[in-house]
Image: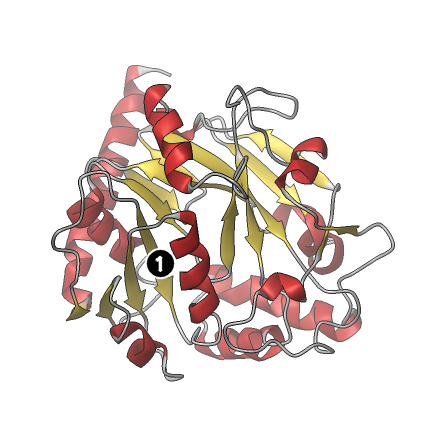
Amino acid sequence: MGLLSSYRLRWHRRRLLFRGWASRRDLSLVADRSAGQAEDAIFAFTTLRNEKIRLPYFLRYYRDLGVSHFFMVDNGSTDGSLEYLREQPDVSLWRTEASYKKSRFGMDWLSFLLRRYGHGHWCLTVDPDEFFVYPFCETRPIRALTDWLDTTQIRTFSAMLLDMYPKGPITDQTYREGQDPFEIAQWFDSGNYQISRNPAYGNLWIQGGPRTRIFFGDSPAKAPALNKIPLVKWHRSYAYISSTHMMLPRGLNLAFDEWGGEKASGVLLHAKFLDTFPAKAQEELKRGQHYAASAEYKAYQQGLAEHPEVWCKWSEKYINWRQLEILGLMSKGNWA
């Protein structure tokens, strides 16, 4: 990369950090319980709106993995999410009525919190419907992974977003508050993924799966990106560019290998396609706070009207992380 390109990326990162700092004015503190956290505490950062039905299991899942504290921004929930989170002893909470779209879809708010609270800690940035799976996760806590990453001087850990869905129309099985969503959404696409490397930022770009198959079949290049870098040993100079898909400095994006590579990686099991999804999609269409005038949610609404069942005869039933490694969707690398 030439000096001019490096200079432009450096200024782009500074602008992103400034946006995050400026966005602090959008946030009203509800509860800050972060005092007294250990130097090696592992943190989770999340933005949400109207996700109360998901929150009990979400918090339980990450507590069981070994997350020490949660930093959460509630963007105008009306379903009791704010009240529920206010009562959680390991949650620091902010609320805002500001525009999700104008905040870079919540990333400016999280940028401020990551810079203020995350520096020097391993930080997991995830949505309430994303569940981190990594090698040996059934037997080893997340600290075992971060200790190994520290030992090998790796600063970022990548994970492919894997859309999970039920067999049959997604509205046929009712999801209950606090339920493990993967009791219902047990299936995924084991193939149909395309990858390319972004020359500007060096990250891999992954697309495909059921969202391409059903919702973007006529325009696969417009399908949502599935590559993410959710786990980072945070430094106050870091910045996410687009959701958690890529970062600056540019070298942090070299977390994925091409298929068949040896770098360890994980998966984010994505519990989007439950019976709650059609109503959520309709709400987000009305709000118009998502990328490209909510074009993704328009595609979801149209696709579900034509294909209420995401499952197909090639769908694979989820077993465990080893199955995903065999299928080439994640890798344990040289972590034994």
Whole-percent x, y for residue 230 in the image:
42, 43
Q: Nearer the viewer, residue 254 or 173?
A: 173
Residue name at image x 39 percent, y 72 percent: 49
Whole-percent x, y for residue 246 in the image:
42, 38
- Of all residues, the one furthest to the right in this rendering is 313
The image quadrant that residue 191 belongs to is top right
Residue name at image x 24 percent, y 30 percent: 10
| Vertical comparison of 132 with 59: above or below | above
Report helix, strand or loop for mark 1.
Answer: strand
Whole-percent x, y for residue 247 in the image:
36, 36
Residue under label 1: 46
> Residue 123 vs residue 243: left or right?
left
Neighbor class of circle 1 (other Cα within 10 Å; few <14, some 14-19, many 20+) is some
Whole-percent x, y for residue 229 in the image:
44, 39
Q: Nearer the viewer, residue 82 or 224?
A: 82
The image quadrant that residue 313 belongs to is bottom right
Q: Nearer the viewer, residue 258 or 13?
A: 258
Quadrant where the N terminus lies?
top left
